[in-house]
Amino acid sequence: MKRTFQALLVIAISACATKPSTPGSSMPGANRNVVGASSPRTAVDEFLAAIRAEDIQTLTIKWGHAKGPARDGDKREQLEKAALIMQCYLDHESYRILNDSPGEVGKRIFRVELVNGTVTRQTNFVTVEGPSARWYVESADLEPVTDICRNPPKE
């Protein structure tokens, strides 16, 4: 099951092509229309805020890779499927960042505790710096949080 989720995320990310993106207005508490984030920690915070708000559009500009936001890809259907899966498995009422550490060159790894009802799980998020010094959540390990998703999407 873990391989399936990872494969879906890899497909969605690798399907992304770089297109220029421009910052827009922001909503209070989060930079809703600004691609990426100003720091690795802020990338995780804004990504999880988009998950909590069930805001797939914002999710796809906070999730990305070294080339930029995931939303700039050509395969919109695959991107939306991966976003829905992440939204289900990373659903939470609250979260806490436990620590962060260096990852591969230019990346940061965050250990995050997600709480959803009586279920509390910890997982890792990897952030990466993209164009214009903007940070994106590149991946999240879904295996430790599979039981958070009450009704998993069909693959």
Image (cartoon, rainbow, N blue to C red):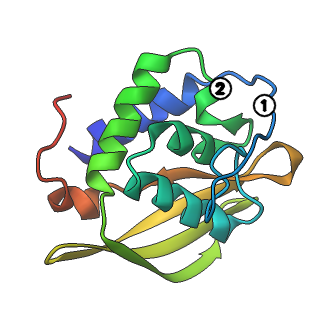
The secondary element bearing badge 2 is classed as helix
Q: Which residue is mark 1?
A: 21
- In the displayed structure, would residue 143 be above or below residue 13? below
Q: Is residue 30 left or right of residue 106?
A: left
Residue name at image x 81 percent, y 26 percent:
20
The secondary element bearing badge 1 is classed as loop
Q: Residues within 10 Å of mark 2 (few under 14, many from 20)?
A: many
Q: Is residue 102 left or right of residue 152?
A: right
* Along the viewing direction, whichever of 129 and 22 lies nearer the viewer: 22
Tell me whether circle 2 and circle 1 mark residues in contact (CB < 8 Å).
yes
- Numbered tag placed on residue 72 in the rendering: 2
Residue name at image x 60 percent, y 48 percent:
62
Determine which quarter of the picture holds residue 143.
bottom left
Determine which quarter of the picture holds residue 95.
bottom left
Determine which quarter of the picture holds residue 5.
top left
Instruction: Give the number of marks.
Output: 2
Classify the position of the N terminus by image quarter.
top left
Residue name at image x 67 percent, y 60 percent:
104
* Along the viewing direction, whichever of 49 and 108 lies nearer the viewer: 49
Tag 1: amino acid? Ser
- In the displayed structure, would residue 62 be above or below residue 43? above
